[in-house]
Structures are given as structure tokens and as C-alpha cells.
Image: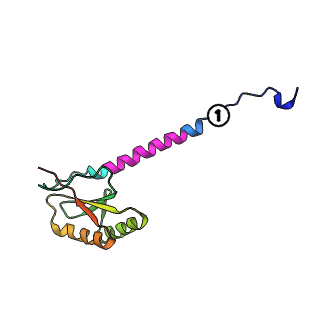
Amino acid sequence: MKPWLAPREPLSVNLTPMIDVVFLLIIFFLVSSHLAQQETHLELDLPDASSGEQDADTPPARVTINVLASGAAQIAGERVEAGEIGQRLRRLTERRATPLEVRIRTDRQATYAAVEPILLECVEAGVRDVTFAVYEP
């Protein structure tokens, strides 16, 4: 009998590493989507607006800045100072090929004095698309 025609053991594929990777990807996407949703679930009493536009179906890269009634600002649930906001926005705009959108969510009781430095930091960082989150009555 020729050696290449000798009976061989049946071939088998070990699927354990692939299953491990799939489960890790599932966990990663679940955690990252939870963190992204958590940012917009911060309870703020948003102001009303009588005009405006709905978001597009495919929004660009967006950073949400929450301004509390006390005037403190938060990005991704973490308190940040006004100068630090500009540094973060500059880093993000340098890394991206697409334009960056900044959404500002303010408490109804927050003053414009708390929002103005954020707007100036956006301009200095080169962000041209700044929107405010409001409720339509």
C-alpha cells in the first residue's frame, strides 16, 4: 500500500478558541453600549424648544457634555473643568477624519455663564457642529 493512501485519523477542528473570542466580543459590545447609553440617561431637566431639527439617521462622531444645575460639566459621567474640555476636544478632532459633533445637555436651572466657556472651548478646538439637547413641548 502506498504511504499517501494509508488510513488516517479523521480530521477535527477545535472550535473552543473561536467560541471564546465570540463571547469576548459579545461582552465587549454589551459593556460599551451600556456605557454609551449611561451618558445620556443622566437625569437633567432639559429646557423646552419650539423650533429645531431631529437628528439625522447616521450621526457623526458625537461627544455629549452634561452641564448640571450647579454649573459643573461632565463628559462620560466624569466631572471636568472648562480648560480640560478644550484639551479633550482637540485630541478627538486630531484623531478623526470626520467632523466631531458636540451635544450640550444642560439642566434647565443652569446659567449661560456655565455654558459660554464650553462654547468657546468648542470654537478653539475647531468643532463646528454644536447642538443643544432640549424637549419639544
Asked whether, in this view, residue 112 is left or right of residue 11, the answer is left
Residue type (three-letter) at the residue carrying disc 1: Val
- Describe the colour scheme in one phrase: rainbow
Q: Does the magenta stretch include residue 43?
A: no
Highlighted range, magenta: 20-37
Asked whether, in this view, residue 4 is left or right of residue 90, the answer is right
Asked whether, in this view, residue 50 is left or right of residue 68, the answer is left
Quadrant holding the N terminus: top right
**Residue 15 falls in image quadrant:** top right
Looking at the rendered structure, the secondary structure element under dot 1 is loop
Q: What residue appears at the point 11 percent right and 55 percent down from the top-left corner?
A: 50
State the residue lying farthest toward the bottom.
124
Q: Main secondary structure of the magenta part?
A: helix
Coordinates of residue 100 in the picture (x, y in percent): 34, 62
Choose between 103 and 52: the one closer to the eye.
Answer: 52
Q: Name the residue under label 1.
A: 13
Asked whether, in this view, residue 137 is left or right of residue 102, the answer is left
The relative height of residue 72 versus residue 136 in the rendered view (above or below) is: below
Choose between 35 and 18: the one closer to the eye.
Answer: 18
Coordinates of residue 118 in the picture (x, y in percent): 25, 68
Q: For mark 1, does the 10 Å Cα neighbourhood hold few (<14), some (14 to 19), or many (20 or more) residues? A: few
Q: What residue appears at the point 24 percent right and 64 percent down from the top-left corner?
A: 72
Coordinates of residue 40 in the picture (x, y in percent): 27, 51
Q: What residue appears at the point 51 percent right and 40 percent down from the top-left corner?
A: 22
Coordinates of residue 117 in the picture (x, y in percent): 24, 71
Q: How many marks?
A: 1
Q: What residue appears at the point 17 percent right and 70 percent down from the top-left corner?
A: 113
